[in-house]
Amino acid sequence: PASRVFFYFSGHGAPDPVSKQAFLVPWDGNPNFLAKTAYPLKRLYKDLGSLKAKNVLVALDSCFSGAGGRSVLAEGTRPLITQLDTSAFDDGLVVLAAASAQEVTSTLKDQGHGIFTYYLLKGLAGDAQDRTGAVTVRGLYDYFKPKVQDAASLQGREQTPALQGIKPGEDVKLR
């Protein structure tokens, strides 16, 4: 009960055009057969939310728009599902996502990471420390959100990281 769980995924996401559900697609996944070869985001949230841990933090460097970047689509389907369901997680689960459900994620090729991952790691390593030397979820988000937005803007795209699962006035100390 006192443990902290950190789940991180960097890779492709995919929307199911029929169910409007988001999936994490592993390296051998097939966007034509999401139900059999990918992992439903709702299931991930449910499984992680059922853990009896003090905190569960999820960081996702993938996009689910179907419009490119770190998103894939089944052959013959149209990109950018505007009403994708990426929600439905339990209390106690905090999610940091690389972009909104309608946006495409970007990479920093010279850094070898997605923009989100690069600034997430820098923040966790200490760049997001507050005056006391602590790194909190809100402090981390406030640190990397404008950096991700600026880096994506330099590439001619919009990318707005999302923070879900923390109520106003709440925070979670990471280190």
Image: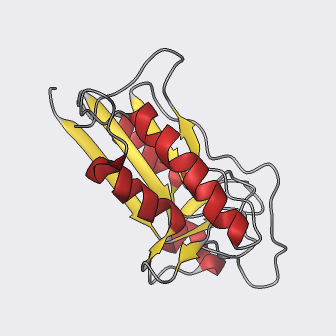
Q: Is residue 2 left or right of residue 48?
A: left
Q: Quadrant of residue 16?
A: bottom right
Relative to 112, does residue 106 appear above or below in the rendering? above
Relative to 1, does residue 8 appear above or below in the rendering? below
Q: Quadrant of residue 172?
A: top left
Assign the C terminus to one quadrant of the image. top left
Q: Is residue 18 left or right of residue 48?
A: right
Q: Residue at x 56, y 81 (%)?
A: 30
Query: Horizontal and vertical percent for residue 83?
Result: 80, 48
Task: Specify whether residue 82 is in view.
Answer: yes
Q: Residue at x 65, y 75 (%)?
A: 69
Query: Horizontal and vertical percent for residue 159?
Result: 68, 58
147 and 43: which is toward the camera: 147
Q: Residue at x 81, y 76 (%)?
A: 77
Task: Specify whether residue 104 is in view.
Answer: no
Q: Is residue 127 left or right of residue 167?
A: left
Residue lying furthest front in this view?
131
Relative to 68, does residue 140 appear above or below in the rendering? above
102 and 25: which is toward the camera: 102
Image label count: 0
Relative to 29, does residue 142 appear above or below in the rendering? above
